[in-house]
Amino acid sequence: MLKLSRWREAALPHRLHYSLILWLSFIITVLLEGESSVQHLLHHPGTRMAYAAYNLAPQWGLLGFCSIKTEDVQLVELKSVSTQVTIRGFVAQVNAKLTYYNPGSEALQVHYRLPVDESAAVYKLEAHLDGRTISAQCMEKKKAENVYKEAVSAGKTAVLARQDENASDVLHLDLGNLPAESEAELNISCIMDLKVQTDGGVNFVLPTVLNPRYSPSSTSEKSNVLEHEYDVARVVTVLKAYTINIKCDISGGHNIARIISHTDSLNVTISEDAKSAQVTQDGGFKSDHDWSLLIYYANPYKTHIIRETGDRSTTGLMKDDLIMINLFPEVPSNSYSNKNEIIFIIDRSGSMEGENIQSARATLLLFLKSLPIGCFFNIVSFGSTFSWLFSDGSREYNKESLAEACELQKSLGADMGGTEILRPFQSIYSKPPQPGYSRQILLISDGEVWNVNEVTQLVGRHVHETRVFAVGIGHGASTALIKGVARAGKGYSEMVMQQDKLQHKVMGLVSSMVQESVQNVRVTFEVEPTSRVALIPKVPPVIFGGQHLVLYTRLPPTTTVKGISIKGNIGSAELSVSVQGSDVVTVHDTEMSLHRLAARAQINQWQLDEEEDVAEDMITLSVASGVVSKLTALVGVDQDGKPVKQIHHESPYRERSRIGMLHTRSGASQFTQLLSCMVDSQDRDVILGSCDTSLECDWQLCSGDRDYVLFDEKIVEDHPQKDLKRKSGVDLLDIVSVQYFDGSWTLTDVADLSGVTLAQLKDKNPSQNESAWATAVALALLESKFNSVRDEWSLLANKARLFISNSGEDVEALFKAAQLFLATQHQE
């Protein structure tokens, strides 16, 4: 038996792995000593601290909370999820149908939460029960909550959907008075805009995973996800892993080259003219990851402009026509600057364990080797605490500073506890930028935090002096945090689910970071008759070379577009993009997808600006468009059904719960053990365990093997280790790791990498400079073996070419000689 005395020092708030140990101790206590020992464990102060410090919940994206009758727990079964996705160009319409069943003899009040993309426009909610349809309407949030409460109190079935107060990528859904022995079908619709990735693929992700998120004790913001504020008779928890049936139709005028998925097997049928496609699942989908696909259009980088007609019977935004502009501006090559101070913030919390931290470690090495000479840099690691690589401030990039950074890179681990992400940002902003240098921040994190608003607002207040870029890692990463800090910091963001794509995407962001800012952006429309054309939001987004830029504009329905001009200044150069009016394609969409996306973009901007006088405008736009915001909600009441009988039990438990979680593994599948902590009338914590896997289980414990190893008061999962070696036998990082800070390689290192002898390299050297020749051979080696991931090493290659040029050599001539040398050696 594990002794409690070993845990007294370990059970500290902000240390995730320690809280997991407490949950594991509870499980072992029940197994070995029975229920009599549980009360002793529950009253241990460390146990209480652990779940007071965290807002944790199961990984399944769709789940519910309710109260307990007495000692038993009831489940609402999620029978099926059917999702229809319609993609037209760069816009996705998603309709999800969730079917639940209440097998009990009494009506239930059920609360669910769903993961959504933070930029998605959620606008429709319907419930179908016994042949009746409940259609929700968008209204001011407090008003909607009152409508819902009154309906539930009257015994009517009702639905309510609200955005989480602190995280715009979480939707709370209440189903009041789900009748006994009945089935409820909930239909939810949203619109998403799709961005072209760095490899040219258009990425669609259907969020199905909502990971546990860290809530720092110091934050003033607490998510209401775990506290059910309504007086309910029964509380249930939806824990069962569910399957999803997904169908996707693709059209929109683009020629489709191919459709793939890095996460799931697909059946893909592309039409003969390549203008449309149908996609279905090849086998069942398990809800332990986000479902995704990549669409490769024949020419994704072509400027694409759509004009959507408005609804003439309404007013405001929904009445006017809406134009969506998709373009990919190029910036001059001389716009890249070494006058940057770049700060790399890396998440080393416990949730980064496994492939995430391995990929972050590899990415950090590429980042360090790609920095231009003359810049300043620093690295901040964070978890429960944070630490600077250079505590005295950013240092100039040179041989000595690079060596120190590489030592940190080698030892990087997910060993810093919780996810206190606010404090490293506060520390950075407390120091002024290097004089004469532009400060850039690059964040890599799985984004599992609740205090999103505090972080994004802090970033927004310092946008005048610092730009922020962000990469979200893994399934269930918070889009509210990752996309939110990038929007607030006038930067760019990427979400990465496939681990081997992390380096590729981060290096694309680094390229954007070292660009000079595009200033004084102007968007001009030539229309007839002359009319006012307004951007939505009114401030244009930041322009980065080669990145997908999306603009929304509204214009009167009576106007004809003759031309569109987008201009900006990069130093002394000018960026200019012009589009003819004939390139504008007009569409009629009954769902008004573009209008709702524009409304969501405006709402996101208002939420970021922290302006007190926009609340009324936000509510008006949200209600008119039907798009949920933090100030509004969707609510619907069954006016035709008979009131359900409500039975109130005398329960010793308060009607609220705190949730704890323990990850376990069985074979290749991961599942979650939920521990629900109720508070009784004496304020004592009572824990009930339940099972959310497809394995045989009972109410105490899930059966099946655990791959946890307990040592030194830590829990370590048996993660599969990622093999970073390429089939060629030479890893990209092997080549990168031995590059010098000035961009050069040595003949000795290149001989080891290329498989040729040092004597052969020296004998065939056409240069007067051995380092220049070695560098050319290293570039040729990169070109021949890693051309498919060129974006990952292009910046360090530019630095290498500059070194060869500064050595007085002809770069192209020496590079061709190196290519010929390698080809000849391999033939021999």
Image (cartoon, grey):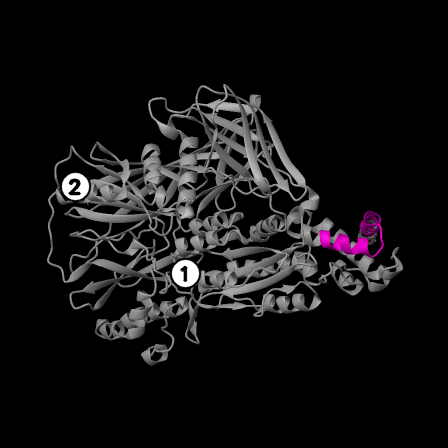
**Residue at the (52%, 56%) spot, across then down:** 443
Q: Label 2: how many residues lie within 10 Å, few (<14), some (14-19) or many (20+)?
A: many
**Residue at the (41%, 60%) spot, across then down:** 665
Which residue is farthest bottom?
5
**Residue 580, position as x, y percentages in the image:** 59, 24
Task: Give the alpha-carbon distance from disc 2 to disc 1, as whole Å.
Answer: 43 Å
Q: Label 1: how many residues lie within 10 Å, few (<14), some (14-19) or many (20+)?
A: some
**Residue 137, position as x, y percentages in the image:** 27, 35
Q: Looking at the image, can residue 93 be seen?
A: no
Q: Looking at the image, can residue 191 be seen?
A: yes
Q: Please tell me which residue lies in front, 305 or 245.
A: 305
Please state the extent of the stretch shown in magenta in the rendering.
798-819
Residue corresponding to mark 1 = 665
Judge from the rendering whether residue 645 lies leftward or rightward of residue 485; answer left or right.
Answer: left
Whether residue 701 is situated above or below residue 175 in the rendered picture: below
Judge from the rendering whether residue 809 lies leftward or rightward of residue 473; answer left or right.
Answer: right
Residue 151's disc number: 2
Say what secondary structure mark 1 lies in. strand
**Residue at the (21%, 40%) spot, across then down:** 158
Residue 152's disc number: none
Q: Earlier in the sequence, mark 2 or mark 1?
A: 2
Tell me if residue 815 is in the magenta stretch. yes
Q: Dividing the picture into quarters, in which one does residue 84 lie?
A: top left
Name the main secondary structure of what is drawn in magenta.
helix
Q: Dividing the picture into quarters, in which one does residue 776 lie?
A: bottom right
Whether residue 607 is situated above or below residue 56 in the rendered picture: above
Amino acid at pointer 2: Ala
Which quadrant holds the N terminus? bottom left
Judge from the rendering whether residue 595 lies leftward or rightward of residue 616; answer left or right.
Answer: right
Amino acid at pointer 1: Arg
Q: Please tell me which residue lies in front, 636 or 497.
A: 636
Tell me if residue 227 is in the magenta stretch. no
